[in-house]
Amino acid sequence: MKYHVTLKPSDTVIQVDARETILQAALNAGRTLPYSCRSGTCGTCLGEVLQGRVAYPDNQRPTAISETQMQSGKALFCQARPLSDLIIKVREIDAVADLKVRTLPCRVMGLQRLAPDVMQINLRLPNHEQLPFLAGQYIDFLLRDSRRRSFSLANPPHASQHLELHVRHIPGGVFSDFAFNKLKEQAILRLQGPLGTFFVRHDNQRPIIMVGGGTGFAPLKAMVEDLFHHGIERPIHLYWGARARRDLYLHELPLRWAKQQPLFEYTPVLSAPADEDGWNGRSGWVHEAVAADYPDLSGHEVYMSGPPPMIEAAKTAFQAQGLALEHLYYDAFAPASD
Ligand code: FES
């Protein structure tokens, strides 16, 4: 059974099968709605149902939408399926519409421990293949049994024959256990991408604040290097939150950027510095450091990536300090679901 779904404000009409998510049908039809986790946990795809009814798998409310939001007509389009024709309100994104999602083999060219639980994986695409993407997007590794695991690209697009990932070891994690214990150089993997709608918007000149938690540094690194590459002159203040000094696994890099780039500022924040760290920098939660430094965020644009609790806490705190939702972009590193 197929339904007509009208996207507002563009008035585009797409066909959506009753068993298909609205997000997937829109992507298949060449329309890009905001999305990140595609598992109902990050909230990036939240929109509004103006007319009609939707349902969620097993009639279970996904974690990223509240009962109140559902009652007020909000819906998570990465999970919602139509129960009738619909009119929905979404923020369509043109910038990634021309970037074709491709499935490609890739070869592992390097494996480097950046911290005890962080591995940098360097990949090379086959000769003559390119993967055009926007800095901040991610790829999925396609694993056996139709499983997939998502990782942000840490390199900027101008070097897109080589791809760089920062993989955190999650004990028991399907891919990260494999990457830390079995993966060897020269191995061939299969990836799909580019995915996601986390990238820097260039339709304004607002100063940028970036907030990364742990390996959430990876897409921000790609964004910063891309902004430098294009000589874009917007002030950037990068906050990198981690537990202890060893978890700031590329600390020297943003320190170097700060020396070389007059408009770039870097503030590392540790939540649990080790005694041996001798840390005399900022301590506490990274979003609290941002909130303390910028009591008025109404003129800024914020890009965040990291664990969902960091994103949730920061969203609430930053909006309370004047940040408009349309200037807040994030990529929550939600746990993978199979
Ligand atoms: S909740 Fe839908 S993309 Fe994350």
Image (cartoon, rainbow, N blue to C red):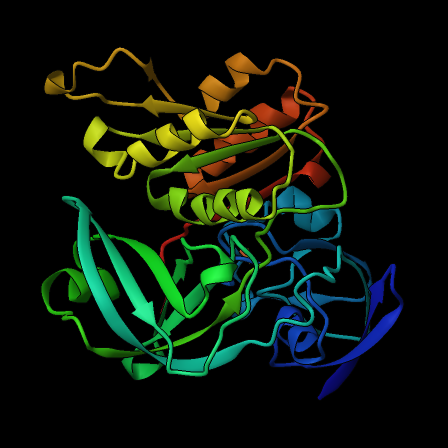
Q: Nearer the viewer, residue 323 or 221?
A: 221
Q: Is residue 321 above or below residue 73?
A: above
Q: Position of residue 45 (x, y in %)?
A: 63, 56
Residue in the image at 75% along x and 66% along y = 53
Residue at 41% in and 52% down: 334
Q: Is residue 108 above or below residue 305?
A: below
Nearer to me, 101 or 147: 101
- Spot occupied by residue 331 in the image (x, y as percentages of width and height): 50, 48
Residue farthest along the bottom direction in this orientation? 1
Whether 144 is drawn above or below 253: the answer is below
Quadrant where the C terminus lies?
bottom left
Q: Is residue 183 left or right of residue 265?
A: left
Count of number-bearing discs: 0
Residue 273 picture quarter? top left
Quadrant location of ligand 1? Answer: bottom right
- What x and y, as percent, mark residue 279? 22, 15
Answer left or right for 62 relative to 75: left
